Image (tube, grey):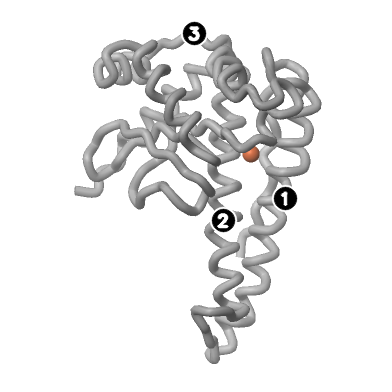
Amino acid sequence: MPKKEQKPLPYDTGSLKGISQKTVEIHHGKLYAGYVNKSNEIKEKLKPIVESGKAEGNQIYSELRGLKLGESFANNGVYLHENYFAILGGDGIPKGEVADAVAKKYGSVDGFKVYFSACGMAARGWAILAWDMHEQDLRIFTCDAQNHGGIWGAVPIIAMDVYEHSYFIDTGSDRAAYIKAFYDNLNWDKINELYARARQYKLD
Ligand SMILES: [Fe+2]
């Protein structure tokens, strides 16, 4: 049973523009690490239940229900944060096939940013540009929690964390200022790499 390992940041914690070293240290070093650790813990706790051959569940409350809810929350917390940290650390200058695709779909890259920003303001957890493997198209989803709001068969390309822990130290309640900083730090080379990989899969 493979254990999840925390992925290191591909840049220095203090190297982002408008997102402080303290925020990145807490976000990556404690919160993301917590998702990795809890994901492993839940897997360990499920193992004897699975192997016993006598698993029992109850929809009002049961240990299994708690573990299964925690499993999707913790694992999505790992995967979305890994996307989030991987696509930051760049110069923020849009380029490549993703920039062309969002410009075509939303009128311009700025048009994409207007809509994606609004989705980030409307969400309580995440705004996510994802490749829908069914529709073979880019789509934007919003999540109030990381295990609610996404759809099956969609691969995150740009996951924007809008939980308050992403920005409150730096911009207080001004989420819009944080979203602007998020764009300023995007690594479009990495985003294009993820886009190219995601487009290899077709579900329909
Ligand atoms: Fe987060």
Please tell me the numbered disc located at residue 159: none
Badge 2 marks a residue whose secondary structure is helix
Tag 2 or tag 1, which sits nearer the N-term? 1
Residue at x 65% of width, y 53% of height: 4
Answer above or below: position of 46 versus 105.
below
Q: Please name whichever residue, 87 or 115, is drawn nearer the observer in this view of the structure.
A: 115
Badge 1 marks a residue whose secondary structure is helix
How much space separates mark 2 and mark 3, taking CA atoms? 32 Å
Residue at x 43% of width, y 30% of height: 119
Q: Disc 3 residue type?
A: Ile
Q: Disc 2 residue type?
A: Phe
Q: Which residue is mark 3?
A: 93
Residues tagged 2 and 3 counted as in contact (Cβ below 8 A)? no
Q: Which residue is mark 2?
A: 73
Image x and y of residue 135, in percent: 22, 40
Q: Which residue is mark 1?
A: 34
Number of residues whose C-alpha sits closer than 10 Å to that of mark 1, classed few (under 14), some (14–19) or many (20 or more) = some
Tag 3 or tag 1, which sits nearer the N-term? 1
Image x and y of residue 108, in percent: 31, 11
Q: Quadrant of residue 100?
A: top left
Image x and y of residue 79, in percent: 55, 45
Tag 3 or tag 2, which sits nearer the N-term? 2
Residue at x 65% of width, y 35% of height: 164
How much space separates mark 1 and mark 2, taking CA atoms? 12 Å
Answer above or below: position of 11 versus 201.
above
The verdict on label 2 being within 8 Å of ligand 1 is: no
Badge 3 marks a residue whose secondary structure is loop
Image x and y of residue 196, in percent: 36, 28
Q: Is residue 18 left or right of residue 91?
A: right
